[in-house]
Amino acid sequence: MNPNPEDELAGTEQPFVEHLIELRDRLIRALIAVGACFAVLCVWPGPGGLYDLIAAPMQNALPGGTKLIAVGTFAPFMVPLKITLMAGFLLALPYVLYQVWSFVAPGLYSHEKRYVLPLVVSSTLLFFVGVAFCYFLVMPALSKFLVAVSPTSIQVAPDIEQYFGTVLTLFLVFGIAFEVPIAVVVLALLNIISIEKLREWRGYFIVLAFVIAAVVTPPDVISQLSLAIPMVILYEIGIWAAVILKRSRPADPSA
């Protein structure tokens, strides 16, 4: 006999101080994981190697012999270090999310746990897919476009701090944008918005996607289309996934 959903968490309450201690411990573990990944990346491939990797899309688009420049005094040291820290966080992200999951899992019902863990895993994978999409497709096309449209009287040599800021922003934007299916699935599974409404609002979302792309990306058509079109496609994928999951869900959520 299945337990009453209202009583399923009975006996699992913890004092507030214990929650704080557990939260502190898990934050420390997450920070240690990020620090360990950062240390490993500092050894290999090193800040210089990671910087070269991030700079490759723009460097390959520049005329032969042209390099990115460093205007700030400490930029040649700080920018590669920031890139290494960012890479360390991304490398440790699965473990960080595992710590988040372990902290919130005891307070969830069994039917909620059934969905939370797959959603955490899939959202992590989609974030990495969005970053990879940006790096391998968007950045090379954007770099070539910027060099191609520059007047011949201008020597294109971007500052590394501004370039890194642009790359980091685009990584975050595309990583978050690729979470659209997760948002759609969550809204549908929690019955916040019905699937029929999500289908009806398809046209509004298309307009919203292009507005968001125009606001959060550089003022060029390549990055804007590269963000808006995948968001529209991922919205449709989210609707299909929500339909499949709702059909496979037991009639009794406490089962």
Image: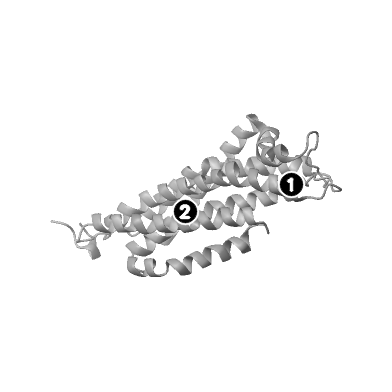
Horizontal and vertical percent for residue 101? 41, 51
Q: Is residue 1 left or right of residue 35?
A: left
Q: Is residue 99 left or right of residue 65?
A: left
Residue count near mark 2 (Cα–Cα under 10 Å), binned few <14, some 14–19, many ≥20: some
Label number found at residue 148: 1
Q: Where is residue 17 in the image (x, y as percent from the top left)?
A: 44, 59
**Residue 75 drawn at (x, y percent):** 78, 44
Extreme-left residue of the structure: 1
Image side of residue 8 versus residue 76, left or right = left
In depth, the one of 209 and 115 nearer the eye is: 209
User: Residue at horizontal 45%, vertical 55%?
Assistant: 233
Q: Report the residue marked by disc 2.
A: 23
- Quarter of the image for residue 244 reads bottom left
Q: Which of marks 1 and 2 is nearer the N terminus?
A: 2
Circles 1 and 2 in contact, beta carbons < 8 Å: no
Q: Which residue is drawn at 64% across and 30% down?
A: 45
Q: Which amino acid does the dot numbered 2 rest on?
A: Leu
Foreground: 194 or 252? 194
Task: Determine the image quadrant of residue 217.
Answer: bottom right
Q: Is mark 2 on a helix, strand or loop?
A: helix
Instruction: Please say whether residue 146 is visible from this viewpoint.
Output: yes
Foreground residue among 127 and 204: 204
- Amino acid type, callout 1: Ala
- Secondary structure of the residue carrying tag 1 is helix
